[in-house]
Image (spheres, helix red, strand yellow):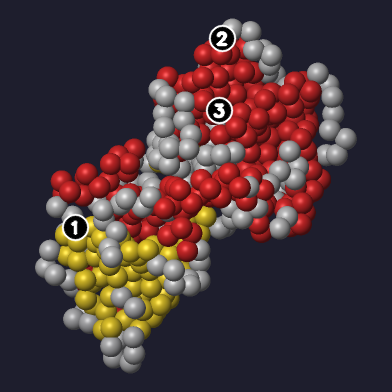
Amino acid sequence: MADYSVFDIIGPRMTGPSSSHTAGACRIANTARRIAGEDIIAAEFTLYGSFAKTGFGHGTDKALVAGILGFSPDDPSIADAYEAAQKAGLKVELCLSEAPVEHPNTARISVTSSKGEVTEILGQSVGGGNIRIVEINGLDLEITGEYPTLILQYRDMPGIVAVVTHVLAQNKINIAFMRVFRHGKGLDAYMSIETDQPVSIAIRELIVGLSDGIIKVFAI
Amino acid sequence: MYEFHDGAALLELCTSEGIPISKAMLLREEALSETSSEALLREMRENLTTMKQAVERGLSDSVRSLSGLSGGDANRLYEYSKAAPLLGSEACAAAAASMAVVEVNAAMGCIVASPTAGACGILPGVLLTLAPKRGWSDEALVQALFCAGAIGLLIARHASISGADAGCQAETGSAASMAAAAVAELSSGTPQMCLHAAAIALKNVLGLVCDPVCGLVESPCIKRNALGAVNALLAADLALSGVKSLIPFDEVVEAMRSVGVLMRPELRETALGGLAATPTAKRLTNTLFAKRENPYIKG
């Protein structure tokens, strides 16, 4: 963290009881929803470490379900997430795992879209409601959501980075951090770009249209 | 540039500019976030509104926590505070209001982490209980939250506000320290007095461990928020009467950090030591986590 804002100290406004086990869990699921697209019909959650051990007392399960439904961490209806899921036709499954994990507050979320597309992410709640996404569809990466973040799914090939950064430069969007990850040469790859200014939907749509290699663009 | 590295620099800034701590913090935030003070004050007022709603709900309802371990005690103490409590009715009501917010938190209600969810009762409990009797307007309370924010910022920067890092001293200790400075400023205390108040409140609970029963933000957290409220009021009264902290604020914060480093992991939110390791806590843990009646669990 660069330096604390007053609202890091007096805030965030959140639905209790725990910034890491409730608010953070909700944010991990919010992020999964953005990555997978919003037409989700089923979600499977695997809780690890302290999430598995004390999660039910902290409403971690409800916060995860609420996050997939798009509730924000300060939404008081997180408590009624299961009822809301039923109403929305979202199928929910929970697994508790004793497998060792790198961070004690970890959740794996596998979501299925109405088209049958499955997206799987691994998220960590690292304290104070802050999170880290460390895996998307089996690919190791790191996204914090502290800055506006643009994520691209594309086919590994020359020129994609240049195309994307050119558009950002033209729109006066400054890149704070940028990383590329790939399954292998010429295969599926991801790019995460953390920016100082948010990237509008119009710019995201522009980027998708620039190359056949770009599969999907989403923002966190 | 309105930046202050530590308490000494904050005091120097306040003295040279002739401004209270709250104003120094507001000016710093304006520069840091490139946001107008009007927008910042508006955002802080949202926090105050959420705090008010949490106090009201916690005092009126007999809220029950998700686990069933807690709830209803804030209401009990609040009713009792109307008679002739030993603490005096104002301090007793502030303690009740602090508990109310943490009970709402445990029942999955909405709160403001200040500085954390586990210590979310102290600041609203103290400020909102004293405000009507002492004629503090909402504008004054919003400013006082910036003063509290400055103290919390310095503690977070030089020590920690997380129980997992440094125990309960870093959570309810920090919150009491922040609330002490805020009420001292609201009571026309000087910036120097505010820092003494903040230092005294933190000193009073140095070494306090984080040992949540069953790993939940309920026991002993709710009652430690009640203690934090009374600690804040006592520290502010001491400072306002002219009593000084022998050890300056910055050194108290450093001492809290070093005590946190010496604290074993069992005493830092892991629920492996202290009250969490008592036979009663272990029995509760077994019964609580045995009844996993969630129909959504696979297998």
Tell me the CA gap for discs 1 and 2: 50 Å
Tell me the CA gap for discs 3 and 1: 39 Å
Up-down: is A100 above or below B18? below
Residue under the image location 40 percent in, 40 percent down? B66
Q: Are marks 3 and 2 on the same chain?
A: yes
Q: Is residue B157 visible?
A: no
Instruction: Please tell me which residue lies in front, B276 or B269.
Output: B276
Q: Is residue B218 left or right of residue B242?
A: left
Residue matched to label 1: A91
Local packing at callout 3 (Cα closer than 10 Å; few below 14, some 14-19, many 20+) is many
Q: Are marks 1 and 2 on the same chain?
A: no
Up-down: is B13 above or below A205? above
Instruction: Please tell me which residue lies in front, B284 or B244.
Output: B284
Q: Which structural element holds mark 3?
A: helix
Report the disc number at residue B82: 2
Quadrant of residue B86 within the rendered picture? top right
Q: Which structural element holds mark 1?
A: strand
Q: Mark 1 is on which residue type?
A: Lys
Circle 1 marks a residue in which chain?
A
Residue matched to label 3: B98
Tell me the CA gap for discs 3 and 2: 16 Å
Tell me which numbered mark, 3 or 2, is placed earlier along the sequence.
Answer: 2
Q: Are marks 3 and 1 on the same chain?
A: no
Quadrant of residue A165 within the rendered picture? bottom left
